């Protein structure tokens, strides 16, 4: 148990409770006493049920499957903590879905990630902790400190422990935009890279993979991406790899945002398994035996420890530390329990 756990106050928004409880289990502390009520017309009410005057508080709230409600609730929590005289407010956003809106790439559109960053700052947050932003430059949208964690080491450790890392393994990026991520995985695992050529025609969750660039015939392939919702691109890549003569195909996601239909696609696909972290709750995970999870909660909890102790968090990026974090995670589970 962490010696300073008693001075850490962790709270959670409505959809952040399961992840926050896993963090608290690592820290040896209890989740803070708080209430969220969502009224029938959509209004959200939040209340802290204990004194937090002069306390450093940490709020866990993903912005994921109910993005708009979760964002608004997050802002109300920050305001509540501020009005309750908290000493500092650190917002923990395991998955920040609006990170997809990182630029003005066509006329008359909003840079949504910047709007979210401004709102979080204006409401009074002092710090943000998140993981694997879709666009890393979003860190620069915040004027307050932002700690950006990475799932790569946890996922690579999982892949190593499956005994599939050898000269036949190729890391595959589903598109050019994820090529840098694939290269980082390949460097960590000591293998080659291939890239999918993907085209998206509209603002939907459907994209078509046109070609695979790289040598994959007779190889085992690990497809890596930061998240998937529909599963379409992942399954297109897997199908394309099989057509190119690939042997076994595996997947690794930083965040599993798969819909029910997406999970069904994975189950019917050429993947042997798709492993991800638990930053987003996946209530339909039981529909596929191919989904596996490892918990990022110990890594976030360790980041909280280091920040609370005013220590650098750079040790989290060390491979040995990632291995220890992995050992504390939920390993090879097909779904994680969702606690009410």
Image (cartoon, rainbow, N blue to C red):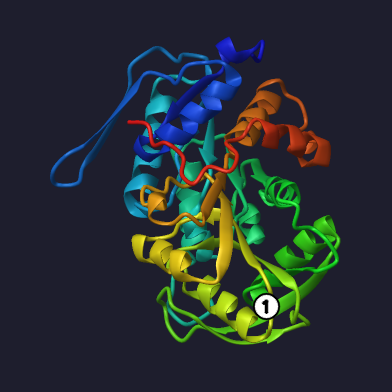
For this rendering, which residue is in front, 253 or 105?
253
Whether residue 37 is visible to the viewer of this picture, yes or no, is yes
Quarter holding the N terminus? top right
Relative to 90, does residue 187 appear above or below in the rendering?
A: below
Q: Where on the picture, by quarter, is residue 165? A: bottom right
Residue 54, x across and y down, in percent: 52, 14
Residue at the limit of the structure toward the bottom, as seen here: 210
Relative to 123, does residue 198 appear above or below in the rendering?
A: below
Residue 132, x across and y down, in percent: 62, 53
Quarter holding the C terminus? top left
Q: Residues within 10 Å of mark 1 (few under 14, many from 20)?
A: some
Relative to 61, does residue 138 appear above or below in the rendering?
A: below
Q: Which residue is mark 1?
A: 176
Residue 72, x across and y down, in percent: 35, 45
Q: Is residue 24 left or right of residue 324?
A: left
Residue at the limit of the structure toward the left, as seen here: 40
Q: Residue at x 42, y 73 (%)?
A: 205
Disc tally is 1
Residue 87, x across and y down, in percent: 54, 20
For this rendering, which residue is in front, 138 or 36?
36
Q: Is residue 83 left or right of residue 124?
A: left
Whether residue 88 is visible to the viewer of this picture, yes or no, is no
* Secondary structure found at label 1: helix
Q: Residue at x 76, y 82 (%)?
A: 214
């Amino acid at each position: 148990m962490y010696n300073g756990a008693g001075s850490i106050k962790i709270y959670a928004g409505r959809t952040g409770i399961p992840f926050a409880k896993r963090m608290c289990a690592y820290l040896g502390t209890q989740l803070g006493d708080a209430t969220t009520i969502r009224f029938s017309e959509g209004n959200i009410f939040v209340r802290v049920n204990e004194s937090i005057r002069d306390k450093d508080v940490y709020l866990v709230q993903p912005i994921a499957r109910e993005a708009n409600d979760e964002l608004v609730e997050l802002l109300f929590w920050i305001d509540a903590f501020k009005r309750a005289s908290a000493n500092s407010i650190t917002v923990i956003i395991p998955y920040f879905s609006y990170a997809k809106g990182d630029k003005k790439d066509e006329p008359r559109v909003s840079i949504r990630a910047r709007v979210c960053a401004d709102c979080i700052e204006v409401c009074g947050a002092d710090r943000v902790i998140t993981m694997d932003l879709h666009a890393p430059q979003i860190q620069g949208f915040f004027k307050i400190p932002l700690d950006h964690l990475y799932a790569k080491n946890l996922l690579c450790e999982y892949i190593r422990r499956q005994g599939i890392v050898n000269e036949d393994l190729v890391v595959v990026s589903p598109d050019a935009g994820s090529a840098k991520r694939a290269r980082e995985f390949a460097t960590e695992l000591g293998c080659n890279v291939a890239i999918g050529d993907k085209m998206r025609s509209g603002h939907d969750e459907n994209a078509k993979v046109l070609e695979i660039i790289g040598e994959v015939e007779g190889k085992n392939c690990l497809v890596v991406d930061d998240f998937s919702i529909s599963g379409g691109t992942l399954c297109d890549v897997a199908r394309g790899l099989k057509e190119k003569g690939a042997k076994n195909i595996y997947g690794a996601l930083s965040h599993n945002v798969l819909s029910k239909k997406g999970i069904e696609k994975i189950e019917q696909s050429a993947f042997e398994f798709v492993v991800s972290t638990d930053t987003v709750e996946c209530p339909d995970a039981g529909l596929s035996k191919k989904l596996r999870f490892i918990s990022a909660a110990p890594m976030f909890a360790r980041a909280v420890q280091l920040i609370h102790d005013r220590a650098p968090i750079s040790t989290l990026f060390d491979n040995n530390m990632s291995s220890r974090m992995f050992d504390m995670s939920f390993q090879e589970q097909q779904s994680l329990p969702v606690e009410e």
